[in-house]
Image (cartoon, rainbow, N blue to C red):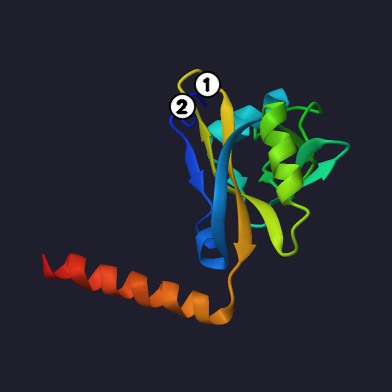
């Protein structure tokens, strides 16, 4: 059981950089239950469909899928429950003011466990890409791959 739990977990949202332009990034703490952090350390997290929103000046994340802990009992958590994100008040006010612009959203880009053992989420204020922007991203990745093959 303990061999499956790792301290250096890093789960990235690969779809996010393809779908969005990142304007600003922040690192936020997350309010979790006991079985949730154990599932994160086992790497059982899906952040590809997650997004953030404001309620009464507080930032929450929705659709962050943390699978139930395998060895949990009836105390196990709901996998898709909304979780509160922890940022400084200044950062929250700044983000909430920018969210009033049309077309901007807050998405998680990475979830990891820091050296203290706490789960952190990197979030980004992002604007959706158009179809031609996505094509340019694909071209840039192809060129980069070809350059790596030549060396």
Task: Give the camera-side residue of 128 and 51.
Answer: 128
Q: Is residue 26 above or below residue 63?
A: above
User: Residues at badges 1 and 2 in contact (C-beta under 8 Å)?
Assistant: yes
- In the image, 118 versus 5, the foreground residue is 118
Residue 144 position within the rendered picture, expressed as x and y whole percent measured from the top left: 27, 68
* Disc 1, SS: loop
The residue shown at (69%, 46%) is 64
Of residue 67 and residue 103, the one placed in the foreground of this image is 103
| Circle 1 or circle 2, nearest the eye | 1
Residue 7: give its label: 2
Please give left or right for residue 151 compared with residue 118 in the image: left
| Residue at which label 1 appears | 117
Q: Quadrant of residue 140?
A: bottom left
Between the residue at mark 1 and the residue at mark 2, the CA separation in whole angstroms equals 7 Å
Residue visible at 54% across and 53% down? 13
Q: Which one is earlier in the sequence, the residue at label 1 or at label 2?
A: 2
Q: Residue furthest top?
A: 116
Please tell me which residue is depicted at 37% across the width and 77% down the height of the picture.
Answer: 139
Q: Residue 142: give its label.
A: none
x and y percentages locating residue 143 in the rendered image: 28, 74
Considering only vertical position in the picture, is 66 above or below 14? Answer: above
For image coordinates 71% across by 64% down, the residue present is 103
In the structure shown, which secondary structural element does the residue marked by tag 2 occupy?
loop
* Residue 63 spot, x, y in % from top left: 74, 50
């Amino acid at each position: 059981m303990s061999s499956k739990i790792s301290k250096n977990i890093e789960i990235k949202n690969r779809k996010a950089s393809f779908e969005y332009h990142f304007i600003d990034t922040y690192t936020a703490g997350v309010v979790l239950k006991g079985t949730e952090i154990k599932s994160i350390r086992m790497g059982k997290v899906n952040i590809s469909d997650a997004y953030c929103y404001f309620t009464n000046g507080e930032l929450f994340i929705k659709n962050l899928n943390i699978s139930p802990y395998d060895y949990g009992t009836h105390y196990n958590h709901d996998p898709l429950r909304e979780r509160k994100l922890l940022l400084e008040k200044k950062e929250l006010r700044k983000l909430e003011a920018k969210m009033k612009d049309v077309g901007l959203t807050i998405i998680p880009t990475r979830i990891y466990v820091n050296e203290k053992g706490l789960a952190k989420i990197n979030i980004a204020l992002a604007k959706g890409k158009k179809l031609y922007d996505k094509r340019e991203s694909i071209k840039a990745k192809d060129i980069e791959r070809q350059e790596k093959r030549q060396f």
